[in-house]
């Protein structure tokens, strides 16, 4: 057993059960507890300082990043707040190529669209009220003249009143047709038909009107002009084109109509003589209540809805309509529709369906 001698510990070295030597060692005293506490305190202080340094460094690094992220969000929120209050003219001035830039671009496009719609709504209200006021004012003046004895309620007065009522009725019908097309409530009964036959038949039935306006008319058809469409709506489209020509073409002029097929499309070209339309106004002809010549009065110029309805009907048939200068000095309306591969007799009218695409 080890023995304590002079504060040393001795350990016997045994060989063959005999103690041949002793090894002595001194047991060292453990450090006092205060050193442990000092070391622990020093480590804790170091950790706290390191943590504070990391927090300060992170704050310094995150401040510009947060500002870069929050600033565009504040701009977006401010713009949306203005749009919510009815100010659609405000735009986000943000030139970035990341998601924030895409968001700003989309919101700017939305603001532009809302601004256009609001402007169109205000213009519609003003112009429709103006259009309705004219025939109503004439009716009122005519009736008051009869009441006051200025005019006699003869056949001429009745005819004048009847003409204004018909004009008012046409305006209301056009507005109703256009509004139904905008909300997708116009039904189309599609069937296979030949556009050249439909156009030629309508021009033949309306030849008396052309003669009364001393307008010469020529019609030409080339190729297979079969399409898939609604006969009544297409007749309405052609009638509106004809009325546009009758109202705006000078007496003694000419109307040239041609229908042809080019690959998988059928094209109708409706050209008349002077007067024409200025280049910068051609694209506006299909806007509702627009007139190419502001000097034209409403008696001769109609309601300004005919070509807008033409565009809606064309879009409902997956086609398009454009305006350009005609080679004979007036206006050319070009209608392009998809060609139909079947034969007219091989297809039966399909079920009525609402207009699709832009017309809905």
Image (tube, rainbow, N blue to C red):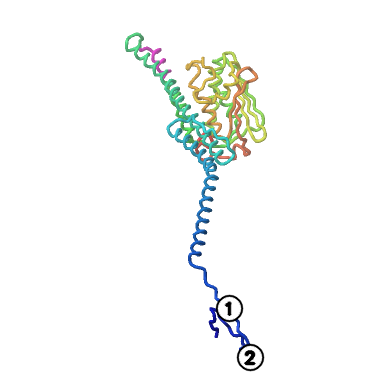
Q: Nearer the viewer, mark 1 or mark 2?
A: 1
Above or below: residue 156 compared with residue 79:
above
On the image, the x and y values in percent for residue 43 come to 52, 59
**Residue under circle 2?**
16
Q: Where is residue 221? Give x, y as percent.
A: 64, 27
Q: Mark 2 Cα within 10 Å, few/some/many (few <14, many 20+)?
A: few
SS of the residue at dot 2? loop
- Pick out the residue farthest to the left: 148
Q: Is residue 131 left or right of residue 264?
A: left
Is residue 278 positioned above or below 14 on the image? Answer: above
Question: How far across and how far down the image is residue 88, in percent?
Answer: 47, 30
Instruction: Answer whether residue 185 is visible to the viewer in this image.
Output: no
The magenta stretch spans residue 158:
yes
Please report contact status of discs 1 and 2: CB closer than 8 Å, yes or no: no
Magenta highlight: main SS: helix
> Which sits in the foreground, 155 or 260?
260
- Report whether residue 139 is seen: yes
Mark positioned earlier in the residue sequence (1 or 2): 2
The disc label shown at residue 7, or none: none
Foreground pick, 30 / 228: 30
Query: Does the segment drawn in magenta span residue 312?
Result: no
Residue projecting furthest to the bottom: 17
Q: Which residue is mark 1?
A: 25
Give whichever of 270, 88 is nearer the camera. Answer: 88
For the residue labelled by badge 1, is the local secondary structure a helix, a strand or a loop? strand
In whole angstroms, how far apart are the C-alphas of marks 1 and 2? Answer: 23 Å
Quarter of the image containing the N terminus?
bottom right
Q: Which residues are magenta?
A: 153-164
State the residue at coordinates (55%, 76%): 27
- Spot occupied by residue 312 in the image (x, y as percentages of width and height): 53, 31
The 10 Å Cα crowd at callout 1, few under 14, some 14 to 19, many 20 or more, is few
Whether residue 250 sits left or right of residue 169 in the image: it is right
């Amino acid at each position: 057993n080890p023995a304590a001698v002079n504060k040393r510990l001795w350990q016997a070295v045994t060989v063959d059960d005999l103690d041949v030597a002793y090894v002595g060692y001194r047991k060292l005293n453990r450090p006092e507890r205060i050193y442990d506490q000092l070391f622990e305190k020093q480590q804790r202080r170091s950790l706290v300082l390191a943590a504070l340094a990391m927090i300060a460094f992170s704050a310094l690094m995150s401040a510009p990043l947060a500002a870069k992220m929050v600033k565009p969000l504040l701009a977006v929120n401010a713009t949306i707040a203005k749009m919510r209050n009815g100010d659609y003219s405000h735009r986000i001035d943000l030139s970035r190529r990341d998601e924030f830039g895409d968001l700003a671009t989309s919101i700017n496009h939305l603001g532009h669209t809302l601004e256009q719609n609001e402007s169109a709504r205000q213009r519609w209200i003003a112009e429709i009220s103006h259009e309705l006021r004219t025939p109503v004012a004439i009716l009122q003046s005519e009736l008051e003249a009869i009441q006051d004895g200025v005019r006699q309620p003869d056949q001429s007065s009745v005819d004048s009143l009847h003409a204004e009522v018909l004009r008012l009725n046409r305006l209301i019908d056009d507005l109703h047709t256009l509004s139904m097309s905008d909300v997708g409530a116009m039904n189309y009964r599609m069937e296979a038909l030949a556009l050249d036959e439909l156009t030629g038949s309508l021009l033949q039935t309306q030849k008396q009107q052309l003669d009364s306006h001393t307008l010469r008319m020529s019609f030409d058809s080339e190729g297979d002009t079969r399409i898939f469409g609604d006969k009544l709506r297409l007749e309405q489209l052609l009638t509106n084109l004809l009325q546009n020509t009758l109202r705006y073409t000078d007496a003694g002029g000419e109307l040239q109509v041609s229908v042809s097929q080019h690959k998988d499309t059928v094209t109708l070209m409706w050209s008349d003589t002077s007067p024409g339309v200025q280049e910068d106004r051609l694209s506006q002809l299909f806007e509702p209540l627009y007139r190419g010549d502001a000097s034209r009065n409403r008696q001769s110029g109609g309601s300004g809805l005919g070509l807008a309805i033409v565009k809606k009907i064309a879009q409902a048939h997956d086609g398009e309509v454009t305006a350009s200068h005609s080679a004979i000095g007036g206006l050319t309306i070009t209608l392009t529709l998809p060609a139909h591969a079947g034969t007219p007799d091989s297809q039966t009218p399909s079920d009525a369906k609402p207009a699709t695409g832009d017309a809905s």
